[in-house]
Amino acid sequence: MIVAVASGKGGTGKTTVAASLALVAAEKGPVQYLDCDVEEPNGHLLLHPAWEHRRAVTVPVPVIDRDKCNFCGRCAQICAFHALAVLPDEVLVFPELCHGCGGCQYFCPMKAITENKREIGCVETGQSGAIQFVHGCLQVGEAICTPLIGAVKEQAAPGTLTILDAPPGTSCPVIKTVTNAGFCILVTEPTPFGLHDLRLAVKMVKKLGIPCGIIINRSDGQDQLIVEFSRDMHIPVLFRLPEDRMVAEGYAGGMPAVTVRPAWKPLFQNLLDGLEAGKQCVS
């Protein structure tokens, strides 16, 4: 089972929920935690894995053979991301814009284009108790992170519960992360801002055809905005986590929520049991 944990905005407690879910699941068996927020991974700050392996991730970028090129401009015409610019006697390549699709090489009539590899980041793996931990680290200055997210997701092991900690928002990196997940947990906060971004996240997962549920984090008991929205959209509220200063202090010190508040463990275990049974728990 692959479970994605996402949110329409940053700061809702997405990583808090994902890490706590992994820790509770690990009490019964092996689990994978894949931190797909490659631009700013922070799951390791809560789960403290012992690192075992690091692998560089590369993308192909075009290399122009100017002895063969006739500067026809075909390569620039088919590039949707403007990674090439053809001048009367020169071809400019902008590697940071290249998505590595290979279209320029395929369509070049003079066969003047080959590909070279460019490193964009790395995938690191480690172990935290029964949790196999994987995350990606994008190099500073890189604009495209979806190939690195794909490399992180390739580490998913069939037959093992896999938890995907998605980047915030609803853009391409999030879509890359949650695609093909069996279930998506949407973490929100009970504020007008939280509701606004939750609406966007719900539209995204519905467009992708992924079943989802909502966790309300930092609940102050005034959750009616979120509850009414969930009823209108026929999406279950899985459970609520109350506003808790000790949890916030623990997070600042690198402690997961269920470590600070063990009484919260049954909430996550009931969620896991419901997902395994194909049910969506509503509270």
Image: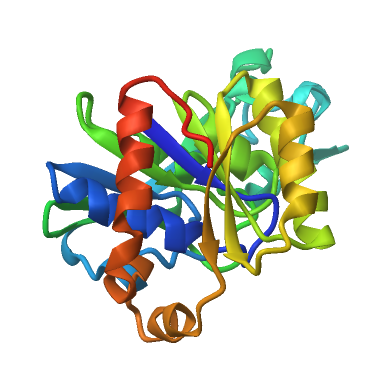
Residue in the image at 58% along x and 24% along y: 102
Left or right: where 71 falls relative to 1: right
Residue found at x 74% / y 26%: 75
Q: Residue furthest right?
A: 88
Residue 275, quarter of picture: top left
Q: Position of residue 141 (x, y in %)?
A: 61, 66
Q: How many marks?
A: 0
Pinpoint residue 186: horizontal percent, then vertical percent.
59, 44
**Image quarter hosting the N terminus:** top left
Q: Residue at x 67, y 18 (%)?
A: 108
Horizontal side of 282 relative to 273 (left or right) equals right
Q: Quadrant of residue 104?
A: top right
Q: Compared with residue 237, is residue 191 higher up or lower down, i.e. above or below? A: below
Res 200 visible: no
Residue 185 visible here: yes
Q: Nearer the viewer, residue 230 or 144?
A: 230
Residue 225 vs residue 58: left or right?
A: right
Image height of 82 relative to 223, above or below: above
Q: Residue at x 57, y 61 (%)?
A: 217
Q: Is residue 151 or residue 78 the one in the foreground?
A: 151
Residue 206 percent coordinates (x, y): 68, 24
Answer above or below: position of 145 versus 177. below
Q: Camera-side residue: 115 or 139? A: 139
Q: Is residue 211 left or right of residue 169?
A: left
